[in-house]
Amino acid sequence: MCHRKKDTETTYKLISDIIIDLCFDLD
């Protein structure tokens, strides 16, 4: 249910990657 958003900010990308990983773990 989580979607990766394209963003040029590296910090946001890192946080997004972590959230994505958590979502995949839940799936």
Image (tube, rainbow, N blue to C red):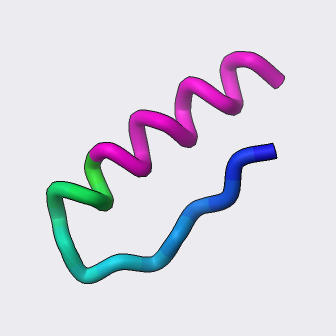
Looking at the image, residue 17 lies above or below residue 13: above
Horizontal side, residue 6 vs residue 23: left or right: left
Horizontal side, residue 25 vs residue 27: left or right: left
> How far across and how far down the image is residue 13, in percent?
31, 59
> How far across and how far down the image is residue 16, in percent?
41, 50
Residue 2 colored in magenta in the image: no
Horizontal side, residue 27 vs residue 21: left or right: right
Looking at the image, residue 7 lies above or below residue 22: below
> How far across and how far down the image is residue 22, in percent?
56, 25
Looking at the image, residue 2 lies above or below residue 3: above
Where does the C terminus fall, quadrant-wise? Answer: top right
Residue at the image position 58 percent from the left and 62 percent from the top: 4
Magenta region, residue range: 15-27
Residue farthest to the top? 26
Horizontal side, residue 4 vs residue 27: left or right: left
How many numbered dots are placed on residues in this image?
0
Residue 25 colored in magenta in the image: yes
Residue at the image position 40 percent from the left and 35 percent from the top: 18
Q: Main secondary structure of the magenta part?
A: helix
Residue at the image position 27 percent from the left and 58 percent from the top: 12
Where does the N terminus fall, quadrant-wise? Answer: top right
